[in-house]
């Protein structure tokens, strides 16, 4: 069997160096509240299934695993980096089972049609072969199951420019070996080619997102006194929610969340 590609070795090496930073990301209250809101939204796209299995691909330090474990009996967090997986601190609901799996998401060691919900938060753009990963997601999803993807969105020219500049900073360069974010058209196209159909789209994050997501990479709010930073974070998130309601602005967000299903599955009934 050939070993991992150079790109994957780079990903493993790079995430080895940022694992501690990821683990400490939600240490500040404003950042913890931001991550909570973002995960609430993301996981609300995953219909709960008390006896079901959820798989988090590229789970990193496991920021969504405990949240998934409130809705699913079995949760698997899978990542290619053992240092990122080691950052998971446990603490999930008693009664749920959470397992960590060191593997490559382009070749899942998981049985076909065995997973109710697959979540992939901010990991797809790290891959050199997204088509292979999406084909694996489709293969392992049960008929009628859901895929939930969260990705940085690249539709806003101003944010594209900001990313282009930020990625040239030494701190950002550590994170991104590939300079990629998907436009809406690219992301929908990738899913379609994999035989997946987008059912719902949530746009997220305008001003609060870059300031709250990773205080080490964008160190602004973390220098304010904690109560003031928490207040600013809440105000910015409220503003972001309002902006996401404006039709002409909505599509220009930093982040996009998609709920998808196998193309041949029925359209789900809305709650
Ligand atoms: C930006 S981090 C996101 C981590 C986590 N989902 C989160 O939102 O905090 C991207 C993750 O994808 C993982 N990754 C990159 N390539 C991968 C691959 N081929 N298979 C599995 N995981 C991979 C990295 O190790 C890293 O943990």
Image: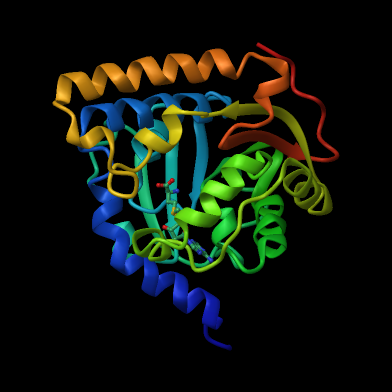
| Left or right, residue 13 beside residue 44 | left
Horizontal and vertical percent for residue 14? Answer: 38, 69
Horizontal and vertical percent for residue 190? Answer: 76, 52
Residue at 53%, 23% in the rendered image: 44
Q: Quadrant of the N terminus?
A: bottom right
Q: Is residue 134 above or below residue 74?
A: below
Q: Quadrant of the C terminus?
A: top right
Residue 71 seen in the current view:
no
Q: Nearer the viewer, residue 45 or 253?
A: 253
Residue at 45%, 54% in the rendered image: 166
Q: Nearer the viewer, residue 220 or 148?
A: 220
* Location of residue 180 (image quadrant): bottom right
Residue 267 seen in the current view:
yes
| Left or right, residue 161 beside residue 72 | right
Q: Nearer the viewer, residue 5 or 245?
A: 245
Residue at 51%, 41% in the rendered image: 54
């Amino acid at each position: 069997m050939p070993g991992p590609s150079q790109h994957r070795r780079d990903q493993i090496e790079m995430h080895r160096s940022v694992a501690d930073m990821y683990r400490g990301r939600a240490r500040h209250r404003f950042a913890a509240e931001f991550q909570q809101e973002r995960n609430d939204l993301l996981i609300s796209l995953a219909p709960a299934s008390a006896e079901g299995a959820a798989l988090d691909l590229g789970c990193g330090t496991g920021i969504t695993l405990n949240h998934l474990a409130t809705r699913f009996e079995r949760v698997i967090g899978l990542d290619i980096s053992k240092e990122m997986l080691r950052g998971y601190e446990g603490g999930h609901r008693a009664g749920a089972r959470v397992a960590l799996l060191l593997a490559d998401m382009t070749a899942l060691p998981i049985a076909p049609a065995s997973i109710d919900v697959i979540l992939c938060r901010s990991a797809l753009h790290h891959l050199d072969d997204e088509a292979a990963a999406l084909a694996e997601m489709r293969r392992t999803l049960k008929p009628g199951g859901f895929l939930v993807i969260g990705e940085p969105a690249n539709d806003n020219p101003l944010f594209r420019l900001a990313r282009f500049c930020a990625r040239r900073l030494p701190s950002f360069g550590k994170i991104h070996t590939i300079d990629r974010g998907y436009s809406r058209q690219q992301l929908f196209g990738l899913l379609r080619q994999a035989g997946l159909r987008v059912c719902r789209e949530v746009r997220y994050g305008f001003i609060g997102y870059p300031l709250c997501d990773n205080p080490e990479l964008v160190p602004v709010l973390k220098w304010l006194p904690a109560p003031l930073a928490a207040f600013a974070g809440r105000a910015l998130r409220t503003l972001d929610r309002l902006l996401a309601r404006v039709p002409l602005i909505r599509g220009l967000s930093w982040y996009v969340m998609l709920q998808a299903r196998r193309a041949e599955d029925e359209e789900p009934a809305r709650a």
